[in-house]
Image: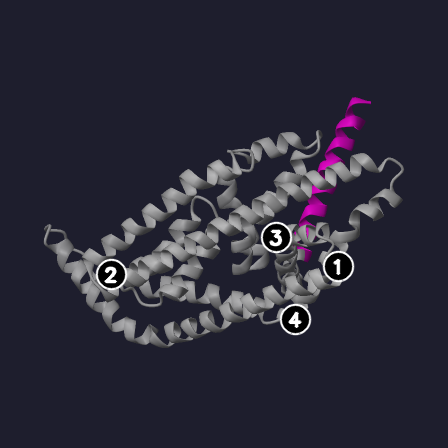
Amino acid sequence: MYEQTNFSSLSRVLLTAGSFVLVVAGMRIASPILVPFLLACFIAIICAPALYWMQEKNVPQFISILFIVFVILVFGSLLGVVLGTSLNNFLNSLPEYEVLIMERMAYIVNLIEGFDLKISSDLLTQYLNPENIMQMAANIFTRLSNALTNIFMILLTVVFLLLEFSGIRDKMYRAFKVPEDSVAYMDTFVGSVNRYLSIKTLLSLTTGVLIYIFLKFVGVDYPLLWGCLAFLFNFVPNIGSIMAAIPPVILAFIQLGTAPTLVTIAGYLVVNTAIGNLIEPKLLGKRLGLSTLVVFLSLVFWGWVLGPVGMLLSVPLTMVVKIVLENSEDTKWIAILLGP
């Protein structure tokens, strides 16, 4: 009997692990479809409070959804045009920056040799090639632009999701014998996810705007591009702000020199410290936090499954999983382990 129990437990573990592998493999294969769908889900969740508010004001459902889609379309179109122009100009300017990169690398070599240290410029260029980092940032924007090219399908999915949101309570009351518990669970889950995504989006947008204004003042090229990068990577706590700062800091050093680079670093530290360490914890609280290790692992995992866009969605996706686990007594211990 003891051996049979152990075998049954082992079988369940293997079955769970095998199912997880199959699901992850399927998600990776379906990433071209899954990424736009996830973007649509996050957009719909963020827009849900506006829909509920208009419904409380007795605005017809069709007009409410039409207005939300119109705002999304206008905002997305303006951002796409401006960001696309900046990205194309940046990609076209990369060859020009190569010459400046080599000059700055020679400056670094001379500076190091001034301390009686011998270093090969070719070796330094090989391991610390700023061009690769700049190209990586450009690739992230390119992949994100490719994901947003099917904007019609994303908007259509947002419309259907908002339609479902508006009538989900009535369906649950008809579907379950004791609907109060299910509705309460749904309200808790949707409220937590919406609160996190709404506050995080607002703070990320504030970060992007401040970075844009600051870089515009310093004189770094393409401040709008780096402001958008700061907005996107602010969804990744702890390490996201560092990743977003690397390309513009390198560009400041290549373009302007040492002193403006130090000013750029100081500006990023001030903005990210004020928003990430002071404002965000007060608004979100510690309950919705993730440990640094979980953030890093989620970045690697979702980036591998969904590509560069998955890296940007990694923490929101992990937060959704954590909130689901928190709302069940059987899995609450896993959510605690994922926390800080």
Q: Badge 1: how crowded within 10 Å, few (<14), some, or many (20+)? A: some
- CA separation in Å, label 1 and label 2: 52 Å
Dominant SS of magenta comes to helix
Report the quarter where the N terminus lies: top right
**Mark 4 touches mark 1? (CB < 8 Å):** no
Amino acid type indicated by mark 1? Gln
Q: Is residue 128 visible?
A: no
Say if 79 sits above or below 58 in the image: below
**Residue under numbered circle 2:** 253
Q: CA distance from mark 4 to mark 1?
A: 20 Å
Q: Measure the alpha-carbon separation of dots 1 and 3.
A: 17 Å
Does the magenta portion include 5?
Answer: yes
Please report the residue visible at 32 percent of the width from the left and 60 percent of the height from the top: 215
Foreground residue among 4 and 306: 306
Specify whether residue 46 is in view: yes
Q: Which residues are magenta?
A: 1-26
Residue 58 sits in quarter: bottom right
Q: Is residue 292 magenta?
A: no
In this view, the mark in front (2 or 3): 3
Residue at 46% x, 66% y: name it. 139
Task: Identify the mark at residue 152; answer none if there is no mark.
Answer: 4
Residue at 61 percent across and 34 percent down: it is 335
**Residue at mark 3:** 46
Among the two numbered marks 2 and 4 on one chain, the one whose residue lies closer to the N terminus: 4
Name the amino acid, label 3. Ile
Front residue of 337/272: it is 272
| Secondary structure beneath label 2 | helix
Give the Cα separation between the discs numbered 2 and 3.
38 Å
- Residue 121, quarter of picture: bottom left
Q: Which mark lies nearer to you, 2 or 4? A: 4
**Along the horizontal axis of the image, is 254 left or right of 163?**
left
Q: Which residue is mark 1?
A: 61
